[in-house]
Image (cartoon, grey):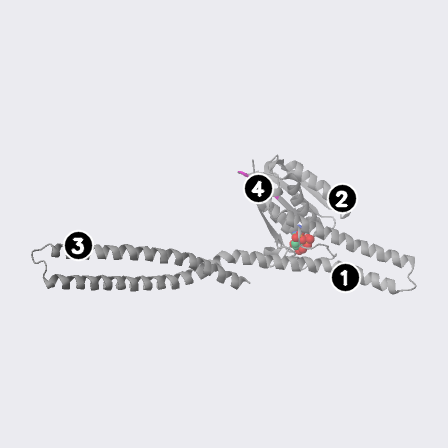
């Protein structure tokens, strides 16, 4: 499909170039042949005015003149045909490369879209299959007890929650594809930070994790709910990937004309080989080091990155295995 699109675009480019080139050549041919005719006509006219008029020499001259005009015109024609052939070949080569370059980002976007659809379908299918298999097995069991049925329903409920989480994450990703739905207003980041901590506190308490917020008064131009969302994603990860009874530092400060928000944990850390990929959709690092099973779909950081990009900011991570990770977010201050 990509190849045929490249060929079609190449043909369009070549057709445009050739229409211009052939049109230009026809105009050039007409003007030049008129000029040649006029120039030689003037010479013969001058000779005809001489007293040697009526001389057969003048008739010869007229014939030679007509031959010369024909010869010059056919020379011009041949040159213009060669010229157009060269233009055709070179424009075809250049157009092909230009068409490939033009369509490359579209091809990459399509590939990413296909990969995303395949990953999303796979993730959606896994809990659905689990639910179907469990339900089928239970239905086949004629002596199914109430306890067992309740266990099944509980397990199905867990899978449904996963599906809910996944579909809402997918929805967010699609919402943040462009900034048309984002309203940029002055946002007090201290309030946004505190709101995010409040939402995560319960989860942190369960693991006896303390979140230390150190906030300098700062404001950015942005969308408050989505910025709170970024902080929640980073804090949620910090809690998820940290051991019990540890500390999370959440600092917001102004550095020159920017604000810097840093969330540091004392968790399991991220391998150097995983670091470049953690912001990719559906990427999950190998968690065999983690003692407990950590739920997730590898979508949180890609949503966070998308939101930060919509705010023209940056986000990156530093990490040391078994020591902890630090996520830094920079935004333009107002
Ligand atoms: P997930 O739902 O899997 O947490 P994310 O996109 O939020 O998805 O994160 C991608 C991956 O990055 C995670 O699976 C995890 O391996 C790694 N990661 C993110 N944050 C941390 C952290 N604070 N500490 C250790 N690993 C992390």
Q: Quadrant of the C terminus?
A: top right
Residue 37 located left or right of residue 114 = left
Mark 1 and mark 4: Cα distance apart in space: 42 Å
Separation (CA) of disc 2 from disc 1: 32 Å
Label whose residue precedes the other's in the sequence (1 or 4):
1
Q: 108 and 287: which one is in front? A: 108
- Say if residue 285 shows up in the picture: no
Q: Which residue is mark 4?
A: 331
Q: Main secondary structure of the magenta part?
A: strand
Task: Tell us which disc is closer to us: 2 or 1.
Answer: 1
The front one of 45 and 247 is 45
Residue marked by disc 1? 129
> Which residue is at 79% across, 54% downward?
158
Residue 207 location (% of width, % of height): 76, 48
Marks 3 and 1, the one that precedes in the sequence: 3
Tell me the SS state at disc 3.
helix
Residue extent of the magenta highlight: 257-261
Which of the 4 quarters of the picture holds residue 116? bottom right
User: Does the numbered disc 2 mark a residue whose Cβ is under 8 Å from ligand 1?
Assistant: no
Neighbor class of circle 1 (other Cα within 10 Å; few <14, some 14-19, many 20+) is few
Is label 2 or label 4 in front?
4
């Amino acid at each position: 499909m990509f190849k045929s699109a490249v060929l079609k675009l190449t043909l369009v480019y070549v057709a445009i170039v050739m229409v211009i080139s052939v049109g230009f050549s026809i105009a050039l041919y007409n003007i030049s042949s008129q000029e040649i005719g006029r120039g030689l006509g003037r010479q013969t006219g001058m000779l005809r005015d001489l007293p040697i008029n009526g001389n057969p020499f003048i008739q010869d001259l007229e014939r030679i003149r007509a031959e010369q005009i024909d010869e010059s015109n056919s020379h011009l024609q041949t040159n213009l045909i060669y010229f157009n052939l060269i233009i055709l070949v070179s424009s075809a080569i250049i157009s092909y490369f230009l068409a490939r370059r033009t369509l490359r980002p579209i091809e990459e976007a399509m590939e990413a879209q296909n990969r995303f659809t395949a990953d999303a379908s796979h993730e959606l299918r896994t809990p659905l299959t689990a639910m179907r298999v469990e339900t089928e097995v239970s239905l086949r069991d004629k002596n199914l007890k109430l306890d067992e049925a309740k266990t099944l329903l509980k397990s199905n409920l867990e899978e449904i929650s996963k599906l809910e989480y996944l579909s809402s994450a997918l929805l967010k990703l699609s919402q943040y594809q462009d900034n048309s739905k984002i309203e940029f207003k002055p946002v007090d980041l201290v309030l946004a930070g505190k709101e995010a901590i409040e939402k995560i506190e319960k989860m942190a308490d369960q693991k006896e994790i303390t979140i230390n917020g150190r906030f300098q008064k700062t404001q950015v131009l942005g969308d408050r709910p989505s910025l709170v969302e970024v902080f929640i994603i980073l804090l949620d990860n910090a809690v998820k990937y940290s051991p019990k009874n540890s500390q999370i530092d959440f600092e917001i400060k102004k550095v020159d004309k920017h604000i810097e928000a840093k969330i540091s944990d004392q968790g399991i850390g991220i391998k150097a080989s995983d670091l470049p990929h953690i912001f990719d959709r559906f990427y999950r690092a190998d968690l065999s080091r983690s003692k407990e099973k950590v739920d997730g779909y590898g979508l949180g950081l890609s949503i966070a990155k998308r939101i930060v990009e919509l705010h023209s900011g940056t986000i990156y991570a530093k990490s040391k295995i078994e020591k902890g990770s630090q996520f830094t977010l920079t935004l333009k201050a107002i």
